[in-house]
Amino acid sequence: MAHDSHGRTIDYLRISVTDRCNLRCVYCMPPEGVEWKPPESILTFEEIEHFASIAVEQGISKIRITGGEPLVRKGLVEHIRRLKAITGLEAIALTTNATLLPQYAEALRNAGLSRINISLDSLDPDVFATITRGGRLADALAGLDAALAVGFHPVKLNVVVVRSLEQDLAAFARLAIDRPVHVRFIEYMPVGDAPLSVRGGHGGGWTEADHVPASEILTALDSALGAEGLGPLQPVGDGSGPEGWGPARYFTIAGAAGTIGVISPLSRHFCGACNRLRLTADGRLRPCLFSDREFDVRTALRDGTDEDIEAIISAALNEKPETHEQRRGTSRRMSQIGG
Ligand code: SAM
Ligand code: SF4
C-alpha cells in the first residue's frame, strides 16, 4: 500500500495517453486546439506500461485511461489489454467523449476494460454542438448505446455544469430514469486558462460566475423534476452509490433505472479522501490536479533505472499537497493534464 505524507492511501493512477482530441469543448480547449506536444515527447505505450507496472508494485491498484480523447490514439485497445495483464492491478477504466465508442466498445470489453465514464454535457443537439464546437450528439449517444450494449456496467455520464452554457439538467435526470446510467453533475473547475467563448462569452478563463455549486444543482434539479411530477431526489444508502473510485454523492428517483450524483471539488472539496496520482501524456507525474508541481518520469523511463522511477513515485507521494486550498487556474489545460 502506498501512503502520502498526510496518511492518505494512494491506490489510483490516472494516465493521460494523448493531449489530442476530436472535439473542442469550450471549457477545455481553444477553438484552434492547443499546440500538440511533439510525438517524441509523448510516452510510448511501452513506457506507460513500464511505469504502470512499477506503480502497481508500489501500491496502485486502479488505473484510469484519459486524455485528450484516449480513443484517438491508435493501438489503445491492445495497450489496455497489456495494462490489464499487470499482476496486482485490480481494475482499469476509461474516460471518453464516447464518439468513437461505436467502433471500439466491444474490443475494449474483450480487452478487459472494467469501466467506462462518458463525458456528455447536453442532450440538446444544438447545445451539444455549441459546447463541443461542432460535435454531433448522435455520435455520443451511439457511443453510450454501444457501451451499454456490450455490457459495461456501470456506465457513468459526467456532466460539467457551467452556468452560461444554460444546460437542461432535468433532461439528464430523465435519461437516468429510463436507462441504467449514473449521471454525475460536476462543478466546473478552475483548470487551465481556457477562454469560455460560447454565446458571445466573456473570455479570459474560468470565472466564479460560471461555477454552479452542487447544492444549487441539486435544488434546481429537484424543482425541475417536481414540476414534472417526478422526484424527489433521495440519497442512495450512505451516499456512496454505485461502485466507483471517486468522491460523488449519489441520489435516486423512485422507479429510476440509474442514479444522479454530484461531484463538488470546489464547494465541498474532498482533498482529505484524495487517493490519486496523475501521469500526463508527456510523462510528468502530477500529485494534485490543482498544483503545477510535476515530476519528470519520462527522463527516468528513457535513461534511468527502475529504482529512479520508484524514487520519483516516492517523491510525488511525499509532496502531494494536503489540500488545493481553492486554488484558481493551472498552467496546463485539462486536456493536457488528463481530466
Ligand atoms: N476526452 C475525454 C472526455 O471528455 O471524457 C477525456 C479527457 S477530458 C479532459 C476529462 C474530463 O474532464 C471530461 O469529463 C471533461 O468534461 C472534464 N473537464 C475538462 N475541463 C474541466 C473543467 N474546467 N472543470 C471540470 N471538468 C472539466
Ligand atoms: Fe476533448 Fe474531453 Fe476536452 Fe472535450 S473535455 S475537448 S472531449 S478532451
Image (tube, grey):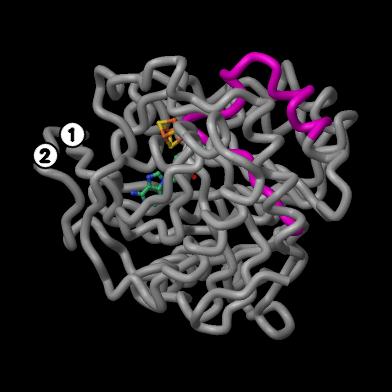
Q: Amino acid at mark 2?
A: Gly
Looking at the image, residue 187 lies above or below residue 105? below
- Counting residues from the start of the chain, the first of labels 2 and 1 encountered is 1
Looking at the image, residue 337 lies above or below residue 185? above
Quarter of the view holding residue 57: bottom right
Q: Assign the N terminus to one quadrant of the image.
A: bottom right
Q: Nearer the viewer, residue 170 or 18?
A: 18
Tag 2–tag 1 contact (CB < 8 Å): yes
The residue lying at 74 percent from left, 45 percent from top is: 53
Residue 44: percent from the left, percent from the top? 60, 23
Residue 172: percent from the left, percent from the top? 55, 50
The residue lying at 87 percent from left, 39 percent from top is: 85
Whether residue 164 sits left or right of residue 313 in the image: it is left
Residue 242: percent from the left, percent from the top? 75, 65
Q: Amino acid at mark 1?
A: Ser
- Calculate the distance from the C-alpha at mark 2 to the C-alpha at mark 1: 6 Å
Q: Nearer the viewer, residue 107 or 150?
A: 107
Q: Is residue 328 magenta?
A: no
Q: Is residue 77 magenta?
A: yes
Task: Report helix, strand or loop for mark 1.
Answer: loop
The residue lying at 50 percent from left, 42 percent from top is: 297
Residue 42: percent from the left, percent from the top? 48, 24
Quarter of the view holding residue 271: bottom left
Answer yes or no: is residue 246 visible: yes
* Magenta segment: 61-82
The residue carrying mark 1 is 197
The residue lying at 17 percent from left, 38 percent from top is: 195
Q: Indicate which disc residue 203 carries.
A: 2
